Image (tube, helix red, strand yellow):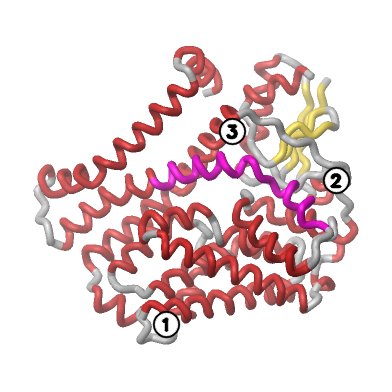
Amino acid sequence: MKKIEVLGTGCSNCIRLEKNTREAIAMAGIEAEITKVTDYGDIMSYGIMSTPGLVIDGKVVSYGRVPSAADIVPWLAE
Amino acid sequence: MTSLALTTARRVPFWATVVLAALAWLVAWIINLPLANWIAYELLGLEQGSAVGDAVAFFLYDVPKVLLLLGGIVTVVSFLRSFVSPERVRRALAGRGVLPGTLAAAGFGTVTPFCSCSAVPLFIGFVEAGVPLGVTFAFLIASPMVNEIAIVLLWGLFGPLVALAYMAAGLTVAVVAGLVIGKLHLERYVEDYVWAIHSNGAPVIEMKLTIEGRIRDAWTSTRTLVWKVLPFVLVGIGIGAIIHGFVPTELVVSIGGSGNPLAVPALVLLGVPLYSNAAGTIPIIEVLIAKGLPMGSALAFMMAITALSLPEMVILRRVMKPQLIAVFAGIVAAGILFVGYLFNALYA
């Protein structure tokens, strides 16, 4: 089961990222658990400064932009 | 929506879509004014020169114009900005001397994408990477204020001179404010927990994006942004249309003109609670200037809206004690006031 974290404090970009991520999970047909990380200290511990960020199994795959579901699907396969 | 995009991509080559979109934009731009006038004066039969007729024609012309400008600019600029990131800027700024660092920060602030929700991580990230406080502030001030949307809109509406003047003034305020804040050594007014945060020092992965990916991203950003600012633009243009048709020039000049020394501070104060959204305010400013509002007052107003944004200050309260926010706002306001009076004097 993939462990996915959406890094962001709740602005519209982070909400869109979570939506696109759920869509990607459905498209890929895999099992995944999504956590929202909203504490600044926790977000920064990943080394990024521009939200929203996407972390899959502990690895930062995207930051500073909102990837589409189509962008996210290949990352889920890695 | 995703499946539709994938289907379209298979039928029409990506680059053909890009070229067609550019052409459509050009056509819309050219027919806009004649079409607006035709609808107002021929189709609706309004009288040219009457208050209502002019207001309606203006509204019909300005809404597509602003949306086209906005759409075109945000797409191009978002595309260019995808090549710069705060993470890269931080690496470039850490460890520099104060003066070169402040100048560089203001410069980088102009070209780096800035989202208000990123203000806090950005501030924390810079500060704990060892970027001096003043340098961080120069970046924080330049970024929203010297914003390319405002500059290109100003260029399109008032010509290169005004746009460059705004840019130069904004950068100067950012640099001077940054230097002053640096000299005041206000580190103790940063919230204590910020110093305790240790971001992962490992270099963040460089995002690999293709040109096509960047264009798609830019288009998504444009769609989202235009959708978000649409109400503000419509209201702004509505107000502009009313002013255009109904408010006499003499009134604008007497209240906002250089004859009234309180005009600049009043406009700066007015800018604070307004959402830092250039798109909605530019139509109003365009009309006010056409009605005689002096350039300095107009620039001060725009700078106050974008740099002294109340929503952003509320966000920054998470990492700054009130004293620091007050100093920051005070210094920037002073800089903006100075720019306002200066340009009023220069243009008089």
Looking at the rendered image, the disc whose residue lies closer to the viewer, 2 or 3, is: 3
User: In this view of the protein, which residue sits in the foreground, B94 or B222?
Assistant: B94
Magenta-drawn stretch, dominant element (helix, strand or loop): helix
Looking at the rendered structure, the secondary structure element under dot 2 is loop
Q: Position of residue B110 (x, y in %)?
A: 60, 56
**Looking at the image, which residue is at 42% across and 65% down?**
B162
* Span colored in magenta: B69-94
Q: Chain of mark 2?
A: A
Where is mark 3, residue-wise? B214
Q: Residues within 10 Å of mark 1 (few under 14, many from 20)?
A: few
Q: Amino acid at mark 3?
A: Arg
Q: Amino acid at mark 1?
A: Ala
Q: Amino acid at mark 2?
A: Ser
Looking at the rendered image, the disc whose residue lies closer to the viewer, 1 or 2, is: 1
**Looking at the image, which residue is at 22% across and 58% down?**
B55
Q: Quadrant of the C terminus of chain B?
A: bottom left
Q: What separation in Å lies between label 1 and label 3 (alpha carbons)?
A: 44 Å
Where is mark 1, residue-wise? B345
Q: Residues within 10 Å of mark 2 (few under 14, many from 20)?
A: some
Q: CB under 8 Å between callouts 1 and 3? A: no
Is residue B215 positioned above or below B268 on the image?
above
* In magenta stretch: residue B76: yes
Where is mark 2, residue-wise? A45
